[in-house]
Image (spheres, helix red, strand yellow):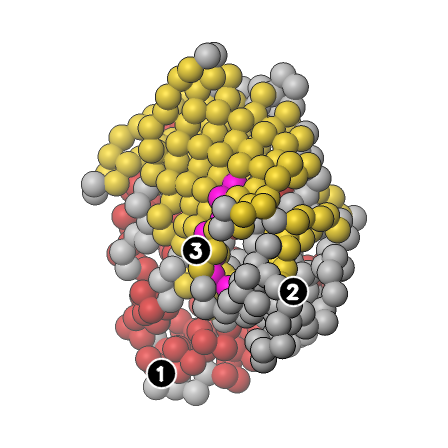
Amino acid sequence: MSRRLLRASTALVLTIPLGLAACGSSDEPVPISASGAPTSSSRQFRPGAPGAGDPYFPTYGNGGYDVGHYRVKVRYDPATDRLTGTATVRAAATQDLSAFNLDLAGLTVRSVTVDGAPAKHARTGNELVVTPARGLVSGNGFVAEIAYEGVPEPLANEVLGVGGFLHTDTGAIALGQPESASTWFPVNDHPSDKATYDFEVAVPDGLTAVSNGVPAGKAGSGGWTTWKWAERNPMASYLSTLVIGKFRLTQGEHKGRPVFHAVTTEVAEGAPDRSIARTTEVADYLEGVFGPYPFAAYGGVVVSDSRIRYALETQSRPVYSAGFFRGGDNTGVVAHELAHQWFGNSVALARWQDIWLNEGLATYAEWLWAEHDGERTAQAEFDARYAGSPARVWRTPPGDPGVENLFSESVYQRGAMTVHALRVTVGDSAFFEILKAWASQKRDDNGTTAEFVALSERISGKKLAPLFDTWLTSTTRPDRPTPR
């Protein structure tokens, strides 16, 4: 995510679930058989945890299962602000489950089936608790289908602001970090459980519905148009998006992959269109730095809404606030969000504390792109940030910023300075090998700071833990890095 527009405002557009502390069922083991009947066997079925156990957000996501694929079919009418949907969740139990949770904010659930059989369901805050007719055996796959409807609403938190499903004058925007997906479909809403997706979105004729991945066609019937999208690479749920409205559309192909751009008609044609039109040029440059582009499609979406003052790296198709282009062409923000396709999307977080891995590497990619595009060098950028960053940047450790500073300037700028300190210390050859190895070895997976440090030490042959400790965890300004 790029946060440039947020520096003048303390209101970050992010999402937090409300009331997720309880799972709605007992944690005591329930001895039941695969048929659902009581049994005295040693197999003990328990409810899955109501959270993924993230140190920063313990109740985000859920435990006890691993999702492989979501199929989300929704119909949305902006005139009534009403959404109806069916979500099919294909998953595998990672423990013997008597019940499991899905994150779903606000919407009304009409029915739930598991493996075709009706299942009991209950709501506890923004948690949907599903109790299948039969116990789910660890290692076995299952399919849950949830029918739901209602008027979707954003989530709010006094620290991190609002985000999620936002109704607009002409449609809607579903967007936000660290959570948003649960405002429009039931989901295991934590980046540690990545999955593939199919989206089918029906909207009134004349509107466009843009989501992630490869365009999979559209069809019209009875005054409605259904837009289909397929994301076949595993995706963290907060990277899913849905943008509905009136757009200038540009479609093409690059290196055998579809290119799909959408710019809201609410802004005049010009800098936004020109800037995202350079997406494939920027991606090709970054491919030379990071290795092969990791997804099956390219694109970008430009929106104009006062509640969205950021750009977000939604997978394969970043969403940009039109404000980034008010001063003219801006490929820096494009470089930032495209760099996230490697670092943050393909290589996703395992826990939110390590957000610097996303934002530090993406900010450094901005510096690299600026140098490539004829602006000042990455070294000059580092020098300027090192000399000019305010005291709060040095007081906040980017490797453990805390929830209140999750998207602070330290995470972005000191995160990028950490990346440059690594480069200076190990030299260009080892540095760029590290970046490519991190992208390739962790492709479609999750990574941690400890794993990045270990990889850097292995490739460089240097002991780097002290360097990372100083730059990521200290609360004072580190000394300038020097070549070793």
Tell me if mark 1 has few (under 14), some (14-19) or many (20+) residues whose alpha carbon lies within 10 angstroms of its own. some
C-alpha distance separating marks 3 and 2: 20 Å
Task: Give the image location of residue 144, x and y in percent.
Answer: 52, 49
Task: Give the image location of residue 68, x and y in percent.
Answer: 43, 55
Q: How many marks?
A: 3
Q: Residue at x 63, y 16 (%)?
A: 79
Q: What secondary structure is marked by label 2?
A: strand
The residue identified by callout 2 is: 47
Task: Give the image location of residue 186, x and y in percent.
Answer: 59, 45
First reached walking from the N terminus: tag 1 or tag 3:
3
**Relative to the observer, which residue lies in front, 422 or 457?**
457
Q: Amino acid at mark 1?
A: Arg
Report whether residue 129 is seen.
yes
Magenta-tinted stretch: 87-93
Q: Main secondary structure of the magenta part?
A: strand
Q: Amino acid at mark 2?
A: Pro
**Discs 1/3, front:** 3
Quadrant including the C terminus: bottom left
**Relative to the observer, which residue lies in front, 31 or 260?**
31
Determine whether 268 is above or below 403 in the image: above
Task: Give the image location of residue 240, x and y in percent.
Answer: 50, 44
The residue identified by callout 1 is: 458
Q: Quadrant of residue 259?
A: top left
Which disc, if any, is residue 68?
3
Badge 2 vs badge 1, beta-carbon distance below 8 Å: no
**Discs 2/1, front:** 2
Q: Would residue 271 be counted in the magenta stretch?
A: no
